[in-house]
Amino acid sequence: MKQLDAERQMRRRKRKNTIFHALFLSSTLFGVIALGMLLIQILSDGLGWLNWEFLTNNASRKAEKSGIKAAIAGTLWMMSITAPLSFIIGVSTAIYLEEYAKKNWFNRFIQTNIANLAGVPSIVYGLLGLTIFVRVFGFGKSVLAGSLTMTLLILPIIIVASQEAIKAIPVTQRNASFALGANRWQTIIRVVLPSALPGIMTGSILSFSRAVGETAPLIVVGAVAYITTLPSGVFDKFTVMPIQIYTWANLPQEEFHHVAAAGIIVLLFMLLSMNAIAIFLRNKYQKKN
Amino acid sequence: MKQFKLGKEHNSFMQKKKGNNSLDRLMPIILAIIAGISVLTTIGIVVILITESAGFFQAVSIIEFLTGTEWTPLFADPKFGILPLIMGTFMITLVASIVALPIGFGSAIYLSEYAPKKVRNFLKPILEILAGIPTIVYGFFALTFITPIIKLVIPQTDLFNALSAGIVVGIMIIPMISSLSEDAMNAVPNSLRYAAYAMGSTKLEVALKVVVPAAFSGIVASFVLGLSRAIGETMIVTLAAGALPNIDFDFLKSIQTMTAYIVTTSQGDTAYGSVEYRTIYAVGITLFVITLLMNILAGYISRKFREEYE
Amino acid sequence: MSIVQIKDLDLYYGEFHALKNVSMNINEKSITAFIGPSGCGKSTLLRTLNRMNDMIDSVKISGAVSINGTNIYNPTVNVELLRKEIGMVFQQPNPFPKSIYENVAYGPKIHGIRNKKELDEIVENSLRGAALWDEVKDDLKKSAYGLSGGQQQRLCIARALAINPRILLMDEPTSALDPISTLKIEELIQELKEDYTIIIVTHNMQQAARVSDQTAFFLNGEVIEFSDTSMLFSNPSEKKTEDYITGRFG
Amino acid sequence: MSIVQIKDLDLYYGEFHALKNVSMNINEKSITAFIGPSGCGKSTLLRTLNRMNDMIDSVKISGAVSINGTNIYNPTVNVELLRKEIGMVFQQPNPFPKSIYENVAYGPKIHGIRNKKELDEIVENSLRGAALWDEVKDDLKKSAYGLSGGQQQRLCIARALAINPRILLMDEPTSALDPISTLKIEELIQELKEDYTIIIVTHNMQQAARVSDQTAFFLNGEVIEFSDTSMLFSNPSEKKTEDYITGRFG
Amino acid sequence: TESKETPTTEGAKEQEGSSMELSGEINIDGSSTVFPISQAVAEEFMALYNDVNVTVNLSGSSNGFKALIAGEIEIADASRQIKDKEVDALKAEGKEAVEMPVAFDGITVVINPENDWATEMTVDELKQIWEGGSTVTKWSDVRAEWPNEPIKLYGPGPASGTFEYFTGAINGTKNESRKDYTPSEDDNVLVTGVSRDKYAMGYFGFSYYVENQNKLAAVSIKVDESAVAVAPSVETIKDGTYKPLSRPIYIYPVKSSLSQPEIQEFLKYYMSEEGQALAEEVGYVALPAEMYEENLSMLP
Ligand SMILES: Nc1ncnc2c1ncn2[C@@H]1O[C@H](COP(=O)(O)OP(=O)(O)OP(=O)(O)O)[C@@H](O)[C@H]1O
Ligand SMILES: Nc1ncnc2c1ncn2[C@@H]1O[C@H](COP(=O)(O)OP(=O)(O)OP(=O)(O)O)[C@@H](O)[C@H]1O
Ligand SMILES: [Mg+2]
Ligand SMILES: [Mg+2]
Ligand SMILES: O=P([O-])([O-])[O-]
């Protein structure tokens, strides 16, 4: 009888497991399907407008002559500063907090502060960048001002993700290193960071994508809407892809909405390539215990 | 191996520190200085918000600002009660969490515990693409895809409504929650899973009773990040939720969030230095304080939960 | 009566042939020891008995393992119930990051026991069984991670006992324990034999000799010799066994 | 000549008094064993000798530990160089998630050895010393995580040998090893004694009796008895020691 | 005209002689309403003078003036006249801005194409609907014979220049308006709203109506009961018969920059016939010729 009971109960647990398996799977598929619908919508709108001229032309008042060259260049310029800078600052901060910081009020304050910065709306960073970088530091509405603003914006995300990744490294590995006479810094560089890198990469991918796709703060910091020259230095004016797309989407002419969709396709392609590189790196380093 | 001979009066560990050790002493200082950048950022934000909103609070009392139920600063007879904007932000965040927390959490569990490795390695990056799509794209998606579906089910729905924007904000933050939660779950050592399986646990029990508790702090962190993102989201709500500050708590009606107010007003036509213009900063500082309070609360919750285990 | 029957079992980790044509019958309510040098496949074989190898993607198995006459690799077998019947203690302590109480109560809880009193009783009995009760009875709410390595392993034994299994698999359960606790566990194992079938992997030949009824000697994935413990240690029929147990082998 | 001198050492984990007024002199180029029941503080004392307890925030230490006449808790002591002189092997295998080669080369590299040839030599010698070379010499580039538990622990021993320490601390280094590897390690320990001072924590009294020159018996954080091994096992001066080594104790 | 159809590179080559002489940067920022004209002018101007770089941004009229005050730009686009405060701020910096109207934007009141009753309305009726505290909730509240159906209102948000002008012109006081309409800062979104709802009504810039004539209908406006109803069109806006919703839009170059040859030339081009044609091409209505001449007369 007990056996029967156990089997009945087991069937119930298995059924529960099956139901939840289905639920978890549908959760995942929900995201995938949402992405699929979005992509279909964008592709059907924009694919017809995507050609070589679109990539090599500047913006124009005429939809069929419009291109995204300056915006691509601007985004690349911006990311070439934002990505390394935010990565270095973010990982450094995470290392400091996880490996060196004593548990005192000051470091708790920094921690709370970072968690809070992660929640500060991007538009507020725009106001900050405008005041500090554009006006006080006198960088003007330049690539540098935009890049630094975006760096501050994505910094907390990288810090928090890096911290979680560093926390996950078992203490026995640190002990092994210390016992061999490694100092803290050597342990960090040779044991902690290599193991934490996959997690750090994931956080960084997400935040770089965010920097590439972010519109509002750059509107405020002053990426320009119409520019036909490419930046040749960090103090030059620039525009970025989301701003160009936003500008097109706001125009009254229907054709420009297709141009905007074509721009989105290019932007997504750029994001995909970035993700691909990062995932490649992540898989290369990922070793599961 | 035997080249090592030391007189007993000479202990090498009393030698002066060299090379690597000076690096070891220098690095914490350098890192601490770099960590200070985030503090400077906060100081910068606070100083700017306070100095710029000071003029506003001279013209409008804080009491009126915090308790008024009408927000019409740009109309001929301005009212400066921020509650409708807070309500709008709250409604968007509520809908977004109802969508994103269970779905993000569910897919994290699926990816970490159920999915075969290949499937996981394929799906996770796909979900991460969602995080990179510019928010204006989501905005149009809400307006041209989600809203019509909602209107089909509930015809009296406004063209701009909190529900549609909230759902799409939720979709946007799913990958952030699922990806970061999955990372936290992935970090739980397999030996714990084996122990649980060996006692006859189903996958679900291993996931919910062993892995999730062990990864709890990482999961909470991902939730907080996701919600902060929902609170701070600007473009989606600007495009899809309308621009009508509204305290009715009706999800089918047009609302306005704090962020949407800031971006439309900062781009719009309010004269520099006027009280109307300074409302941007007054709203900005409110938003800042709200996210601060929320984070403190989340930190408290995660600490309290963790105590039990450590 | 043999409760476990292993027949022509081969196991591969990818390309690596880890178990080679293993056949073996294990008697009910007896203690069987697996001995052999490191890497010879003892843990691997142990894990085939409760299908823990299912977790490892690269594993390929052929042959049959029957428990009570049922092939446990039959697709209709309910793996969870199988594992409830077959408790397991691992080589390295792996307590959950929960309180001591919750660690032990985990198994009974998932198998449907809700009653607080009943749980309290199971927890106490299991901890007593694992010779840990006296040390932790006042700290049941404390995290298991605060215990020393030896205490953690005993906690894991208590956790396995709590699901009241019929067969108990132990993978070097005492390798992290001090002699006193080891003795207690060994005594306990002898006691449990009254009701349970026990299979124990050990490096400690004295232990095998002391506690087990039958011993299997493994080498490179093969069973070299499997016979009554007294026989195997006093009068091994294989040269390799003799070399190993007399320490001449390496 | 005593190389390690411990005097009036007290250690607290927060409120918990883990080591009580421990005093002990350890001779150069000898093997000292720490025995005692689980939780008695053996590992804790071992960790005070290379200041690994520095890592645990709650630890408070008073008293003195001198190595070669220098108090290692003196603030001017270079902890990293101290630890280079004092190798350590832990209770549980803890290889880095790196290749076998990189695990062993880790220590020499951080201490400044760059030369590939020199490294190769150190890696080979150390792996030989840990009785692992033959098993892994063709797989040096493979991840250490692919090794079995026993192999992993031997790798950790090789890693400790690679920094060429003067003193070697071993916390139950063989508790995860099979008897053959254990024997090899025991032999190795005997060999190393020619040049090194070795302190070994063990649960295995036979092991203590076999390998060590002196043995310390711990109970509840106190040293009950510390004397020549042959003396301690044949003719213990304390009743408690006798009870423990004869297994009467619990 | 011809020039706007000329491919840019060829145009540039034809004009090589003059392009040699001009170089420099011109920075424009401000109203999103004026942006399309400035962009079009900049595009053609740069084709003629390829050593001149013109950048055009859109951050709203006020932010344009702010950038002008801060000295970040030489020309501000504005959909409204400069305010005293802004003039004062400029003065404080030792600057002065020159007002140059560049086109008309005929704010258009739109309804759904299926709406066959409200095709013409008086200013009074519009006021009845849009004024602050308006009690109109159904079409029949305006005229009894109109359908007894709820009226759905769409319009620009209160931060926009269009809102300010419309409320001033219809309701009599700037920014005085009922608040329970559906506002959006994105005019395309308003187009969508009105085009999907038979009982909807809204207002926004003429260019958005022109581009969406197939989805929308424009309401003809009568200044009073007795006047004739005038529909918005290039002609009616230009000749001033479309009243009172024709508003001029402006650029404000800073006075000190007018002596710079590239800026002078740019402004001349802006006011030329080519420039006027560009304004119409992007959906606005050119001003009477004498207004451009007046602008040009302000150049040194
Ligand atoms: N997951 C795995 N993937 C690949 N090979 C494995 C895996 N687990 C074990 N092996 C290999 O299979 C062989 C047998 O391993 P097993 O763990 O069964 O040995 P063991 O006899 O228990 O040794 P020990 O006494 O060291 O625990 C070893 O050579 C080991 O390297
Ligand atoms: N980090 C720590 N924090 C608090 N208490 C600890 C810590 N480490 C050990 N202890 C406690 O100190 C006591 C001595 O622990 P220690 O690890 O030295 O014992 P041991 O003799 O090595 O035991 P075992 O043989 O089980 O390894 C134990 O009661 C243990 O619970
Ligand atoms: Mg094993
Ligand atoms: Mg210990
Ligand atoms: O952008 P505007 O100033 O024209 O609203």
Image (cartoon, coloured by chain):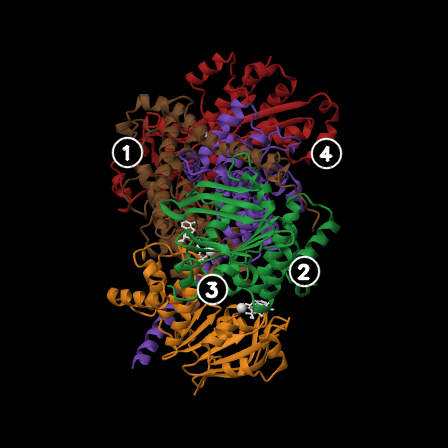
Chain colours: A purple, B brown, C orange, D green, E red
Q: Are marks 1 and 2 on the same chain?
A: no
Labelled pair 3, 4 in contact (Cβ < 8 Å)? no
Q: CA distance from mark 2 to mark 4?
A: 80 Å
The three-letter code of the residue at mark 2 reads Arg
How many residues crowd around disc 3 within 10 Å: few (fewer than 14), some, or many (20 or more)? some
The three-letter code of the residue at mark 3 reads Tyr
How many residues crowd around disc 1 within 10 Å: few (fewer than 14), some, or many (20 or more)? some
Marks 1 and 3, the one that precedes in the sequence: 1
The picture quadrant where one finds residue E204 is top left
Residue situated in front as seen by the camera: A27 or A174:
A174
The three-letter code of the residue at mark 4 reads Glu
Q: Is residue E219 left or right of residue E36?
A: left
Q: CA distance from mark 1 to mark 2?
A: 81 Å
Q: CA distance from mark 3 to mark 4?
A: 63 Å
Which residue does the numbered mark 4 point to in the structure image? E10
Labelled pair 3, 2 in contact (Cβ < 8 Å)? no
Q: Is mark 1 within 8 Å of ligand 5?
A: no
Which residue does the numbered mark 1 point to in the structure image? B70
Which residue does the numbered mark 2 point to in the structure image? D128
- Is residue D239 depicted above or below A258 in this figure? below
Q: Chain of mark 4?
A: E
